Each structure stands twice: as C-alpha cells, then as structure tokens.
Image (cartoon, helix red, strand yellow):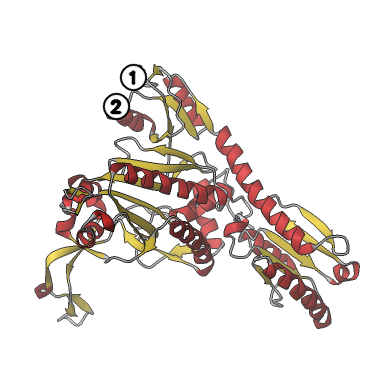
Amino acid sequence: MSKGLPKRSEDYSLWYNELVKRADLAENSAVRGCMVIKPYGFSIWEKMQAELDRMFKKTGHSNAYFPLFIPKSYLSKEASHVEGFAKECAVVTHYRLKADPSGKGVIVDPEAALEEELIVRPTSETVIWSTYKNWIQSYRDLPLLINQWANVVRWEMRTRLFLRTSEFLWQEGHTAHETKKEAIEETVRMMNVYAEFAENFMALPVIRGVKSESEKFAGAVDTYCIEAMMQDGKALQAGTSHFLGQNFARAFDVKFAGRNGELDHVWGTSWGVSTRLMGALIMAHSDDNGLVLPPKLAPIQVVIVPIFKSEEELAAIREKAHEIMDALDALGITVKFDDRDTFKPGWKFAEYELKGVPLRLGIGPRDLQNKTVEMARRDNLTKSVVNLEEEDLAAKIKETLDDIQKSIYEKARIFTQEKTTAVDTWEEFVEVLENKGGFVSAHWDGTEATENQIKEKTKATIRCIPLDQVQEDGECVLSGKPSKGRVLFARAY
C-alpha cells in the first residue's frame, strides 16, 4: 500500500499530495479547485468536529445556521471587510437556465438577472450581523454566543487538498457583548479553546499570539491566532479569533439599551477553524510510510488482523478477537476486526500503516496456543508481545494509546523548539530562513513598511506577536530602528 510513496526529504509537496490520495482522505473533484472528502478523511473531520462542538457548548455557545447567499450590498457596509474579500468572491448573477436554442444543453437565461447580485458565503459576518439587529434589543439579550458549521467559498487560483481549496468546511463563531472587556475576553477564550484542542487532541504544539496590523482579519480590531510548525519548516495558521470592536455593529446598526437606559452599539467577535486542520494533522506527524494519527482523532484506534490458513483457524481467532473487542468497547476504544479473506495479512499491515491506525494487533494460531498477542505501534513502528496470562490486554492497550498520544505531541514539540531560532542580524535572518527554516524570532520596528520589505525580500511573514513575548529593547533586524520585543517570522502555507 505505502510502497512508492514519495519521500518527504526529496519532494515534500508531492509526498503530501500523494499521501492524501493514497490514504483515501480526499481527491480533486470535477469542479476546479474543489475537493471530494472521502469517507476515511471525513471520519477524521467528524471526530474533530465532535470534540470542538463539545468544547464550544461547554463554553456556552449554541449552534445555528445562516444563509449561503449574501446580498452584495451587505459586503459594502464594512469597508475594510469588503476590501479584504473582494478578490475571492464568487457571485451569483442569474436565477434561471433555459434550453440552448442550438440544442446544445442549457444556457443562462438573460431575462433572469437578479435585481441584486448574491455573494456565495466567503465568511458570514455581514449576513449574521444583519440578523443580530433583529435579535438584540437590550443588555438582557447579551451576550449572544452563536456558532455555525458550514461551507464557504473563497475563489482560489492555486489550490491544494485541505490546505487551500475554493470551497472548504469550517465553523465560524459570531458573538455579541455588552462591553469591550467581555468581547476581548471571549476572543482570547476561543483562541485558547483552539490551542487546547490542537495540543490535547491533534497532538500539535502551537504558538498563541496576535497578528500584525497587515496580517489581521479584514474588519477586525485585533486578530488572535495559533500558529503551528510543519515538518518542512513552514508555519501554518491553525486557527484565528477576532476582536471586532464595534465595527460590524456600527455597519449594521446593532444597538442595545444599556443598564442606564442609553443606546450603544454592541461589541463583537468572530472565530473559526476549518478543514485546513486536516492538512496540519497530516503534515505535522506523518512519515514516509503514511499517516501517523494521534489516537484521540483516529477513526480506528486499534485494528485486529487475523493470521490464518483455514476457516477453523479463523473461527478460533474470531472468537478471541470478539472477546478483545468487547473489552475495548467498554473502555470507549474504537476497534476493527479485519477478517477479509481477499487480502493477505502483510497487505493489511501495510494498509493500516498507510492509514495511520495507532495500534495493530496480530493474532495467529500460535498466539492462541501461547496465549499471546503481537502489538505494533504506528508512531514508532515498534512491536511487542503481550502475554494474556500476565497482563490485562485492554488496560495495556489503553495505556499504550495514551502513550502514543503523548509521544506524538512530544516529538512535534521538540521539533518546533528546534525549529525556532532567535537572530539579531539580517544576515542571520536570511541564513536561517534559507538553510534551516522554521520560526525566526527577531526584532521588528513595528512598521508595515518594514514588514512588507521583509516579505518581498524573503517571502517570510510575521506569523504572530507571541502573547508570552518578553519586552526587551533591541534593533529591528532589517531597518535597525528601535524595537521593544521579538516577533515570529516564517514562510507559511
């Protein structure tokens, strides 16, 4: 199954694209720039979605759904917002087709032009805030904590499965608050929810920070983010949370009667993560043999592969396998028994290795006789034999899955640490970017002009101003002007 998978060291991009396809995660669709997420890939996304949804509801949020189509005039109401998304918008101009008079299929009916063009949702701030105007009347209606799971369209010329497609799946939270302080607290809270999910479920260490002025979300006052490091030394923005101030409330005249009886505009936030997290999961952990999935997000946490020559042997193994499955099921561990007789055990081993199943159990007639089970870990490709008379297999498996989760995280944490380099001169900055990659911690004078020059010269952007940034006097790595602290630069997806 994994034979012939390109090596990361030789062509990282090709390795990624081939792995996504061969592991049955997704494929390109007939619609340019869009993807088909296959069942195995979607099952991983469903686990992500379920955990995030649980975390959102735990913090008081409710799910709703808003229209896919947004009137063009809505996008015109918040100037910086429309400027930020104008070049990515797909526009609906007509509402009807008709038969082509030439007999060649159908054509757009020129008589069916819309009175106002509709934008296919690139993000929902405008349509949601137009709705909130009807929902919010007084401070008693606040805070309003809403999330929606949806698809969005941002027209892309250069696409890559999961990382950048014209249509993708995501969630977007949109909240309204009585005070600026509450809205900022919500913005930071949701960034931390994303960070907790990334680290505890994806086994992905992240840097919490704030975007620079030029990198923040169009229409936001501040954008908080989590940034992760991929194995090729490029950064990936894994989630964003935006403090919107009163910008959208003013644009859509969303006011509330305060506790003093006076009218004021509400304070807003928005925050989201998308199927881009699938790309992060693949690129941060996988190897030349295929996917490496953290157990908490693996659709199949344990697979049992029988090794048999006859139906009698399979029947005996099946009986033992079902006993193991019942014990694992009681612990909430997902397990599959692959008794297909159309493929040999070696082929199955390679298949589950490619698909990143965290733990594989092999059981043959000799194992039954010896009362043992062979256990193979996907993360480090090691094997061990468990003596069923001496150890509780279900407890051993749970312990091993927990260790795999921690091991995957620790490996990524060490990698991120090793790929973070502090530099003080422009020569060092360029040398690290070209030869080592990763995060470059450097002083910046705080100006957009310098930020743009660095981007033009190196293709590196400010990934974030870390929240744990230490205030220290220094000189900007490019301009030599005074700086109060270091920021993180990197080339990124």
Using residue 264 as the reference point, say whether residue 455 is left or right of it: right
> What is the CA distance from the residue labelled 2 to the residue labelled 1?
10 Å
* Secondary structure beneath label 1: loop
| Quadrant containing the N terminus in the rendered view | bottom right
Q: Residue at x 41, y 24 (%)?
A: 485
Task: Tell me the element at label 2.
Answer: loop
Q: Amino acid at mark 2?
A: Thr
In this view of the protein, which residue sits in the foreground, 14 or 48? 48
Q: Nearer the viewer, residue 469 or 257?
A: 257
Residue placed farthest to the right in the image? 370
Rendered position, 316 above or below 133: below
Is residue 5 something that shows in the picture?
A: yes
Q: Disc 1 residue type? A: Ser
Quadrant in which residue 220 is drawn: top left
Instruction: Give the residue drawn at x 63%, y 42%.
Output: 411
The image quadrant that residue 482 belongs to is top left
Which residue is label 2 attached to? 447
Q: Which residue is mark 1?
A: 479
> Residue 221: which numbered mark, if any?
none
Q: Nearer the viewer, residue 318 or 11?
A: 318
Q: Earlier in the sequence, mark 2 or mark 1?
A: 2
- 36 vs 124: above or below: below
Residue 56 placement, left or right of 264: right
- In the image: residue 463, left or right of residue 414: left
